[in-house]
Image: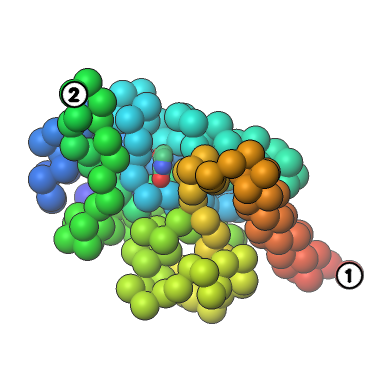
Amino acid sequence: MNTSLRGLRESAARCTACDLYKHATQTVFGEGRPGAHIMLVGEQPGDSEDKEGHPFVGPAGKLLHSALSEAGIDERDVYITNAVKHFKFIERGKRRIHQQPKQIEIRACRPWLDGEIAAVRPQALVTLGATAARALLGPSFRLTAHRGEQLASDLAPLVFATIHPSAILRSPDDETRHAERARFVDDLHVVAQALADTRQERAPA
Ligand code: URA
């Protein structure tokens, strides 16, 4: 198989490794340049992403993009993808309601994610939400206990886990939403700082 990002994307578009392809509109592969310093991994495309074919273009994506900019992270240096590349949903009338992917679906999709990590070779990898964290850091990983910490992992030199931007959108009131968003920006800021620190360590004296 062609293991470049383009080759992986073309192969993933034909993926039938689990049943999710049967109902989703299309495979939503990651986006960004090989060599991007930061890789963000979400759960799975949502309704808008499924229709448009790009990751994080719906409401959670808008929040994510504004938080990245507030944390001083240049989008051109970010590769964004998901643990699962097809939208999983149930239909309720005209609405398509997101459903959490099962372990078997996450596992079926893992080769694409591994391929993306190998092709991009990010300096910092950040999981967004519990599904991506468990997919990459193991089923016993506890996001509430380790959110925002630098984690020991061979996935990338710097590995962090934070919440999913959809969780912020689900906040019960404005006050909580503002507080959760600020904490999310803080987490991204820690990533940006850790990256800046490693670059400084590597720079010739
Ligand atoms: N949520 C995700 O985890 N990924 C997307 O691409 C959009 C919403």
Against 80, residue 136 (above or below) is below
Q: Quadrant of residue 90?
A: top left
> What is the secondary structure assignment of the residue under circle 1?
loop
Q: Quadrant of ligand 1?
A: top left
Query: Amino acid under label 1?
Result: Ala
Q: Quadrant of residue 107?
A: bottom left
Indicate the position of residue 82 as horizontal and vertical percent values. Answer: 38, 48
Horizontal arrangement in the rendering, residue 68 relative to residue 145 (left or right): right
Against 61, residue 78 (above or below) is below
Q: Determine the residue positioned at 53% across, 63% down.
A: 161
Residue 205, numbered circle: 1
Colour logic:
rainbow
Horizontal arrangement in the rendering, residue 112 relative to residue 200 (left or right): left
What separation in Å lies between label 2 and label 1 (alpha carbons)?
63 Å
Horizontal arrangement in the rendering, residue 115 relative to residue 94 (left or right): right
| Residue holding disc 2 | 93
